Image (cartoon, rainbow, N blue to C red):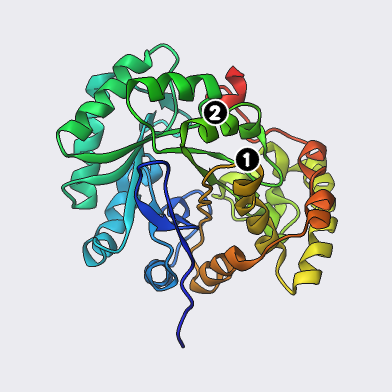
Amino acid sequence: MSIEKINTVTLGTAGPTVGVQGFGAMGISEFYGDTDETAARDTLEATVEAGVTLIDTANVYGRGANETFLAPFVAAHRDEITLATKFGIERTDDPKYRGVRNEPAYVKQAVEDSLRRLGVDVIDLYYMHRHDPAVPFAESVGAMAELVAEGKVKHLGLSEVTGAELREAHSVHPISALQSEWSLFSRDVETSAAAVAAELGVALVPYSPLGRGFLTGSFTRADTELQSQDFRRGMPRFTGDNAGRNAALLEPVRTVAAAHDATVGQIALAWVQQRAEVHGLTVVPIPGTRRRTRLLENAAATRITLTPGELALLEPIAGQVTGARYADMSSTSSARE
């Protein structure tokens, strides 16, 4: 059976051409419970078949294991995909530790490690995963710019920065993409970053556009319905009374889904995709999945257009969500707005 490929778009003013929806590979290695590696590899193959060409990973996912897992797929499809990875979050043997590192020496070592694990000579899009305000952008983005000059990286990106921070970093070296959480449940990026990105010609790459699965309507309470090793069991929006209240917010999404003969998740993805028109910028969401059928379902959402009335029905949802995006919001953009 042939698969209809999704449309393409340029990632930022001078970035690469990618499918209008990308793929977030994080969940293949950890965070969401056990992974069937055979099914995950089949899902990766489906990305290419569907035209989902922006493949997103990070050095912190599985402490390097995610990049290593992707390496055979990358080798087989190097000319067909745009490879994105990140540095900036540090983990150790202490499972509770999460550090943020942006100093130039760390940037240079991190890229070498990622190149080795991925088995490539150049990374298409290299993100600063989190920003440490103690390290000036002149130093950290300056170090990233040196990687471009050295031919180890083609384009630069940032994640979870404010509009003012994006502008400052862009003055050091052009930024092609800003990756931030953006969904029907999470609209922090609209405070300042989206407008600045539109002004500067920077693409928005929404991560968790399905609200880490909540927006698929497939479960209502993470602390009782998910595997013990699933990190969502400790996230404020997914537990206790918050979970029930937030699950009730999906009713208008179900109404819209029924009108389009679509799933709840597809409507959530279509909503994110149409932020491009609302904010006048390029938007390439990166939903993640370990199942081929879900990958194809997600890609099909790019062909759904919501009416003004439907957008108005969905507009109030984010403002009614209870619970923070993370238990610790200190390294997110919203903590610095």
Q: Judge whether 88 appears above or below 310 on screen.
A: above
Percent of width and height locating residue 285:
53, 51
Q: Nearer the viewer, residue 60 or 7?
A: 7
Location of residue 31 with respect to 234 vertically, above or below: below
- Horizontal side of residue 56 vs 163, given as left or right: left
Instruction: Indicate the amino acid at tag 2.
Output: Val
Residue plotted at (50% across, 48% down): 31
User: Residue 184 at what x, y percent from top left?
Assistant: 71, 47
Label 2–label 1 contact, CB within 8 A: no
**Residue indicated by mark 1:** 279
Secondary structure at badge 1 equals helix
Determine the residue positioned at 16% across, 47% down. 121
Q: Is residue 79 left or right of residue 11?
A: left
Q: Look at 38% across and 20% down and name the residue there.
A: 171
Q: On the image, numbered disc 2 is attached to which residue?
A: 196
* Figure quadrant of the C terminus: top right
Helix, strand or loop for disc 2:
helix
Relative depth, front residue between 304 and 103: 304
Residue type at mark 1 is His
Q: Position of residue 99 (x, y in %)?
A: 42, 24
Q: How many marks?
A: 2
Which of pointers 2 and 1 lies earlier in the amino acid sequence? 2
Q: Which residue is outermost to the bottom? A: 1
How crowded is the residue under tag 1: few (<14 C-alpha within 10 Å), some, or many (20+)? some
Name the quadrant containing residue 266. bottom right
- 10 Å neighbourhood of mark 2: few (<14), some, or many (≥20)? some
Residue 236 at what x, y percent from top left? 70, 37
Residue found at x 63% / y 55%: 213
Residue 38 showing in the rendered view: no
